[in-house]
Image (cartoon, rainbow, N blue to C red):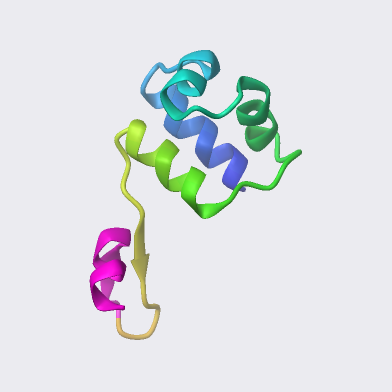
Amino acid sequence: MIGKTLKYMRQTNNISQEKLSLLTNIGRTTISDYEREKTDINFENIERIANICGFEIIFRNKKTKEEFQVKQVERKI
């Protein structure tokens, strides 16, 4: 599932795997492997790719509907 999301974010912004590789300092073949879910991706790289593609990661509590972003989590800890 995360692979399709990563590919969607990249393609929505017309960013090639090669360009994303240069912007993130992640190998192009690694990005391809992430998108095809051949390799697990850590949260730091998910966040880096999302930021470059203009997306933000929002967490939502199912019970309370409280929402917060990654940068807000760092302040709460």
Q: Quadrant of the C terminus?
A: bottom left
Q: Is residue 61 left or right of residue 72?
A: right
User: Residue at 62% across / 48% down in the picture?
Assistant: 1
Q: Work out which residue is located at the far bottom of the displayed protein and give it.
A: 63
The magenta segment: 65-77
Q: Position of residue 18 (x, y in %)?
A: 53, 14
User: Residue at 58% across / 47% down in the picture?
Assistant: 2
The part of the image, by quadrant, that contains residue 69 is: bottom left
User: Residue at 32% across / 60% down in the picture?
Assistant: 70
| Residue 74 forms part of the magenta stretch | yes
Q: Work out which residue is located at the far right of the displayed protein and give it.
A: 38
User: Residue at 51% across / 53% down in the picture?
Assistant: 43
The front one of 40 and 62 is 40
Q: Position of residue 10 (x, y in %)?
A: 45, 27
Above or below, 43 relative to 25: below
| Residue 32 forms part of the magenta stretch | no
Q: How many marks?
A: 0
Above or below, 21 relative to 49: above
Q: Position of residue 64 (x, y in %)?
A: 30, 84
